[in-house]
Amino acid sequence: MTIGLMSAMPQEADALVARLDSPSVHQRAGRRFIHASCHGVPIVVVFSRWGKVAAASTATELIVAHGVDRLVFSGVAGSLRPEVSIGDVVIATELVQHDLDASPFFPPRVVPLLEIERLPTDATMSDDLALASRDFLRDESPRAWENLTGRSQSNTLHRGVIATGDRVIASHDARLAINAAVPDALCVEMEGAAVAQVCFEHAVPFACVRTISDSADHHVEACVASFIAGLASAYTAGIVGRWARAL
């Protein structure tokens, strides 16, 4: 068993590697694939880069060239629902490409030839990540908020649909458009569904965990910048690190 850990920011990848044993760097396809281990389990960590094409390329490389047979994606996302707050965690049950439209040949958001709209995640991996997330939110998250912002904060775990698209959602109108296209989506990001499709086609179990950094509106730039400054790494290392140690 070799685990692939993809993160949406290089800071998150570095924070994960700091919790692993015997890291070594392999340069390939313009990316740094960091081979390490956790309690004897081989792990490969990599920064995905932004967007669906970059993420799909990275996932394929992990599976084909590095022998990964399970894959987890972590990173930040914008909330699409009022009950999903900044600092909350979302574990994907399914992922949808909200901007995919091959009509009139296929209905909007349906992946051509696969003929599915919603790409599934692995139930066991997702359950285990949910347990790790609950423990992190209870034990580590309040302290991380206090250390980095000077104020304590408690947050919530959610499980549901995540929307993916090649666009930073930074306006109320853009957010409403995604709400209309995928009404049950909890948050929006730029990579998850692309990685889910690669894993689906290669029969590799996949899970996706996202931390809410913003409300997918005109405040996105300031919110994401401050979140990436420290909280994103703390969440990724805390949640995915806990999950990896329990393997």
Image (cartoon, helix red, strand yellow):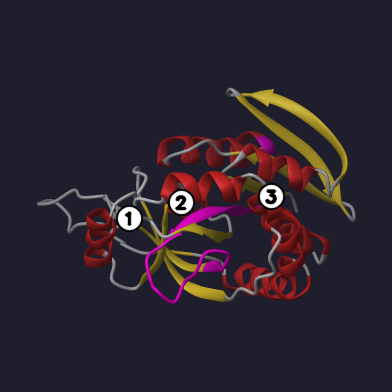
Residue 24 image-quadrant placement: top right
Q: Is residue 81 magenta?
A: yes
Q: Is the Cβ of the residue at disc 2 closer than 8 Å to that at disc 1?
A: yes
Residue 107 position, x and y percent, is 17, 59
What is the three-letter code of the residue carrying label 3? Ser
Q: Tag 1's secondary structure?
A: loop
Dot 3, how many residues are within 10 Å of its Cα: few (below 14), some (14-19), or many (20+)?
A: many
Q: Is the Cβ of the residue at disc 3 closer than 8 Å to that at disc 1?
A: no
From which residue to which does the magenta span run?
66-91
Residue 105 position, x and y percent, is 13, 51
- The residue to which callout 2 is attached is 201
Question: In which quadrant of the rendered image does the C terminus lie?
Answer: bottom right
Q: Nearer the viewer, residue 153 or 238?
A: 153
Q: Does residue 80 lie above or below 22 as drawn?
A: below
Q: Earlier in the sequence, mark 2 or mark 1?
A: 1
Taking the spot 40% from the left edge, 51% from the top edge, the residue there is: 219
Q: Earlier in the sequence, mark 3 or mark 2?
A: 2
Q: How many marks?
A: 3
- The residue to which callout 1 is attached is 114
Left or right: residue 188 versus residue 136 is left
Which mark, residue 192? none
- The residue to which callout 3 is attached is 233
Q: Tell which residue pokes out farthest to the left in this image.
A: 104
| Residue 173 visible at all | yes
